[in-house]
Image (cartoon, rainbow, N blue to C red):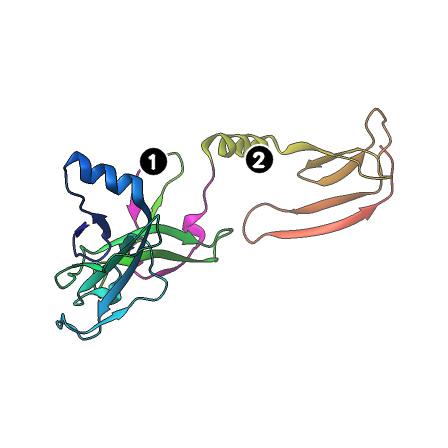
């Protein structure tokens, strides 16, 4: 005898279970002489017709996960047992009622795309729950330093193009950047590679200078002259003087 566990609902898993008599002798015979159990799943080729079944290709395990295309169909599992003497039993069957749609849901939601503002992002996920209707999507953003999410007005599609309002950074990094801007000067270490030696890059509001560590010698520099208020104006001058 064969029974099915699980519900005939899209997304659920049906499992075929052999029902063995509870007597000690029958349990002993089953465990001692059973060699192999083969399964084959079938589906009703006509929705609502439980008399026309066709095999489901490659479905030979004891379990089967119901899919979108199974909605309205009846499922059947066939089980054949082979003993240690090579004898096979008559097929045992278990059937379901017509499969119902599952509750609408989306699993494995993820956002594709990353980088800078003006980049295009897309939301992806695996939908289940019958034929998808007008699913609701809402894009949100969090402000710098706040864990709260705020809805982005009008952004309810599967695609989203980032803009300047989405630009943000970590609070600690933002604080450091503000300090550098107020100071108006910053130094960077440029690591050497191959035959190139390590250098120190000094940047201030007027110029960019490359310095060899432990030396007062500077290399050809680029002086930056410009205004720092709109409209911005920048001119670059190449110099070969030493400091």
Q: Nearer the viewer, residue 172 or 128?
A: 128
Tag count: 2
Label 1 – label 2 distance at C-alpha = 26 Å
Q: Which residues are magenta?
A: 147-169
Q: Is residue 141 above or below residue 55?
A: above
Residue 215 visible in the snapshot: yes
Which quadrant does the C terminus fall into?
Answer: top right
Query: Where residue 181 is drawn, which disc sits there?
Result: 2
Residue plotted at (73% across, 40% down): 208
Q: Position of residue 46 (x, y in %)?
A: 18, 75
Q: Nearer the viewer, residue 100 or 237?
A: 100
Residue that label 1 marks: 147
Residue plotted at (59% across, 45% down): 228
Secondary structure under badge 1? loop
Residue 137 visible in the snapshot: no
For the stretch drawn in magenta, the main secondary structure is loop
Q: Position of residue 179 (x, y in %)?
A: 55, 30
Residue 153 is inside the magenta segment: yes
Mark 2 nearby-residue class (10 Å; few <14, some 14–19, many ≥20): few
Residue plotted at (37% across, 41% down): 143
Query: Where residue 96 is drawn, which disc sits there?
Result: none
């Amino acid at each position: 005898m064969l029974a099915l566990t699980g519900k005939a609902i899209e997304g659920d898993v049906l499992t075929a279970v052999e029902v063995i008599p509870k007597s000690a002798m029958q349990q002993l015979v089953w465990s001692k002489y059973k060699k192999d159990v083969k399964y084959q799943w079938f589906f009703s080729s006509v929705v609502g017709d439980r008399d026309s079944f066709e095999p489901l290709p490659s479905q030979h395990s004891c379990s089967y996960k119901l899919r979108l295309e199974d909605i309205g169909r009846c499922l059947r599992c066939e089980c054949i047992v082979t003993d240690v003497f090579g004898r096979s039993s008559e097929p045992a069957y278990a059937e379901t009622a017509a499969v119902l749609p599952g509750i609408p849901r989306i699993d494995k939601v993820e956002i594709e795309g990353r980088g800078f503002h003006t980049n295009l992002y897309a939301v992806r996920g695996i939908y289940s729950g019958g034929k998808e209707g007008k699913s609701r999507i809402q894009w949100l953003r969090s402000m710098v330093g706040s864990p709260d999410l705020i809805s982005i007005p009008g952004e309810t599609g599967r695609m989203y193009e980032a803009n300047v309002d989405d630009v943000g950074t970590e609070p600690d990094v933002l604080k450091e950047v503000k300090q550098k801007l107020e100071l108006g000067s910053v130094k960077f270490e440029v690591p050497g590679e191959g035959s190139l030696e390590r250098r120190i890059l000094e940047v201030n509001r007027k110029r960019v200078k490359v310095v060899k560590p432990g030396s007062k010698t500077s290399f050809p520099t680029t002086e930056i002259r410009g205004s720092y208020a709109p409209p911005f104006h920048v001119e670059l001058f190449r110099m070969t003087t030493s400091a």
